[in-house]
Amino acid sequence: MEPITEISKHTDLNPNQILGEQLWKLYDTPRTINVETFYQIMETGNLMLLVESQKKLNEKQQEKLNKTLNDVWLDLQEYYYSETNKQSFNRFKNNFKNVILCQNEVTGCYAGLKLVELGIEEGYETLRFFKISATEKEQIESAIRRKETKLELLKNKLDNNDKKEAVSFYKMVANVERNLNRQLNLTEINLERWIAYLTEIKEKHESEKKLARNNKNKRK
C-alpha cells in the first residue's frame, strides 16, 4: 500500500531545494490508510500515525504538517461516517460544527481583547457580540478562558465518539470474518475495502430479512 507523497506545496522551501526530495509521506485517502491504523487513530487521537515517513522539519514546516494532518483526518472521518452509519455521521457533523463555532468564538474574543489593549473601542463591541460584557482586562481574560474550557469539552466529546467506534473494531473484525467465512489479514486491508465489506454484509442481511418476511407472508 503506497502512501501519497506530500512535497513542496506544504513547505516554504524553494522548489529547487527539494527537487526529488520527500519531506513526508501521508496516508491521506481511504485507499492508502490501513483500516487498523484508522481505528487506532480513532482510539488514541495520534494523528502522527498518518505519517509514513518524515524528515526533520523546522517549526514552520511542522505547523503546516499539523494543519495538513487535521484536514486529512477530518476528511477520513467524514468518509467513514457517511459510508457506514448515517446517524453517526449526523452526530459527527453536529459535534464538529459546535467545535468550529466555539473555536471561532474564542478566536474572535482574543481579537477583541487585542483591540481593547490597543485602545480601540470597537474591541468592546466585538466582545459584546460574543456575550462578554466585562470591561476590565482580567475579567475579559477570565471569560475567554471559560470559553476555552467549553471548547475543550466539545473537542473531548468529538474524540469520545471516535473512541466508541474504535472499541468495537475487533468485534467488527470477528463479525466480518464470520460472514465472509475466512480469516482477514488486516495488514492488507485499507479503509475503502473495509467499508466495502461492511456494506456487503449489511446488504446481505437486509436481503435475508426481506426474503424471510416474504416467505412469512406467503404462509399466511
Image (cartoon, rainbow, N blue to C red):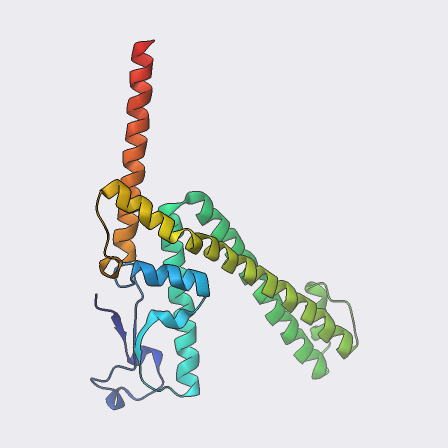
| Quarter placement of the N terminus | bottom left
Q: Quadrant of residue 47?
A: bottom left
Marker count (numbered): 0
Whether residue 206 sits left or right of residue 141 in the image: it is: left
Residue visible at 46% across and 43% down in the picture: 87
Position in image of residue 103 (x %, y %): 57, 66
Position in image of residue 159 (x %, y %): 50, 60
Which residue sits furthest top? Answer: 220
Whether residue 79 sits left or right of residue 183 in the image: it is: right
Position in image of residue 68 (x %, y %): 39, 72
Residue visible at 71% across and 82% down in the picture: 117
Identify which residue, 215 or 145, lies in the foreground: 215
Question: Is 176 rendered above or below residue 37?
Answer: above
Residue visible at 30% across and 67% down in the picture: 27
Residue visible at 47% across and 47% down in the picture: 90
Question: Is 186 rendered above or below residue 112?
Answer: above
Whether residue 140 sits left or right of residue 200 in the image: it is: right
| Quarter placement of the C terminus | top left
Identify which residue, 108 or 98, lies in the foreground: 98
Identify which residue, 180 or 161, lies in the foreground: 180
Position in image of residue 74 (x %, y %): 42, 61
Question: Is 38 rendered above or below residue 51?
Answer: above
Q: Quadrant of residue 139?
A: bottom right
Q: Quadrant of residue 104?
A: bottom right
